[in-house]
Image (spheres, rainbow, N blue to C red):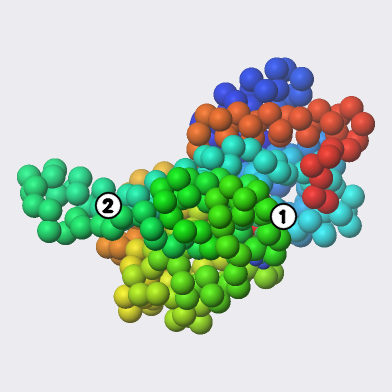
Amino acid sequence: MFSSHAFAKPFLVQSNNNKHELIFAEQALDTMTADMAKGCEAVSLFTSDQGSAEVLEKLGEAGVKYVALRSVGYDHVDVAKAKSLGIKVANVPAYSPYSIAEHAVALLMALNRKIVLGEQLMRKNDFRLDQLVGFDLHGKTVGIVGTGKIGSAFGAIMHGFGCKLLGYDVYENSDLVREANIVYTSFEKLCQSADIISVHCPLNGATRYLFNKHSFSQMKRDVVLINTARGGIVNTVDLLDALDRGIVGHAGLDVYEYEKPIFFQDHGDFQIKDELFQKLRSHPRVLLTGHQAFLTNEALAGIAGTTIGNLDAWASNGTSENEVA
Ligand code: NAD
């Protein structure tokens, strides 16, 4: 179990119930650590692990036959390469979508109602309200990019707030149309009309840098962008430029395109050398969390249950219904 963190271990141990021999490693999987898998039939990866062709080749040489992902997203694994090596890869196709949807709402609310700034001022004994004016969500137009499990959970919450919903997806979600009156439109129109945009599509060839100079230039002034999906969907340089031009009013981000060497660890006194990240983190209208949207008891139990379920299925008949390669 690469990239094992204290927050996940008890859930995995409980779900496993001594069925498989689990070896927990704090290290992330990469070309340097792949050898640690020698003697293991399966490895389990988190989003911070590398599943590149080179790493998969090393895993294959080490005798690994199965890769159990502890995530929905599998953009960090070269699934075609895994297939060619005969290594099976399974993801956790669904776990509490509410965990991520509710975190997206938390980022939106904290930004809009200036919760972090208000708390900082109060700690300085400054109880003035002049910098803390937000807006009503009621009646605003919320654009949702990707209306699958998480996007539709987010949409249901926003519908409850009294927002109008616009959706962009390659498939229309008829439940969301019926239950939350979402109106599907083109990505361009969504950008032009939304007061708030929340990203819930996977990172793939079609969505990489979907948010770029061109799409930002079409947005309403002061739009709020929330991204709890994957960092690579947003071009960070272009986002910073759009923030500085006043196009994007606020950005709430749980993911960052170059997050891998930064997130999920304590850097202590070491300076993080990524200047783009420093700019993003210090921007007064950006609220950043370190890929923690999934971090609820319910989601962690769901991830552990399906991960162990994939191992069970492979152990009993060599296939799992959650295979992506
Ligand atoms: P899902 O498969 O249920 O929904 C994704 C939706 O995106 C689908 O409706 C799909 O049709 C749509 N989509 C695919 N390609 C698209 C495109 N080119 N343009 C527009 N829409 C497109 O997945 P989900 O469970 O809702 O998860 C969504 C994403 O959230 C995951 O892929 C993952 O990257 C991210 N995620 C983040 C965290 C976190 O902790 N921050 C946790 C879990 C998932």
From the image, tell me which residue sits under label 1.
77
For label 2, count other residues whose C-alpha is less than 10 Å away and answer few (under 14), some (14-19) or many (20+). Answer: some
Label 1 residue near ligand 1, CB within 8 Å: no
Q: Residue at x 69, y 69 (%)?
A: 205
In the rendered structure, which amino acid carries the disc numbered 2? Arg
Quarter-of-image position of residue 134: bottom left
In the rendered structure, which amino acid carries the disc numbered 1? Val
Left or right: 47 in relation to 289: right
State the SS at label 1: loop
State the SS at label 2: loop
Left or right: 322 in relation to 6: right
Q: Residue at x 35, y 50 (%)?
A: 109
**Taking 229 as reference, is 27 above or below it?**
above
Q: Residue at x 60, y 28 (%)?
A: 301
Left or right: 183 in relation to 131: right
Marks 2, 1: nearer the viewer: 2
Return the residue nearer the eye: 309 or 1.
309
From the image, tell me which residue sits under label 2.
113
Q: Residue at x 46, y 80 (%)?
A: 218
Return the residue nearer the eye: 239 or 160.
160
Residue 115 is situated, as x and y percent measured from the top left of the image, at 26, 48
Residue 183 is situated, as x and y percent measured from the top left of the image, at 58, 62
Residue 194 is situated, as x and y percent measured from the top left of the image, at 45, 67
Label 2 or label 1, whichever comes before in sequence order: 1
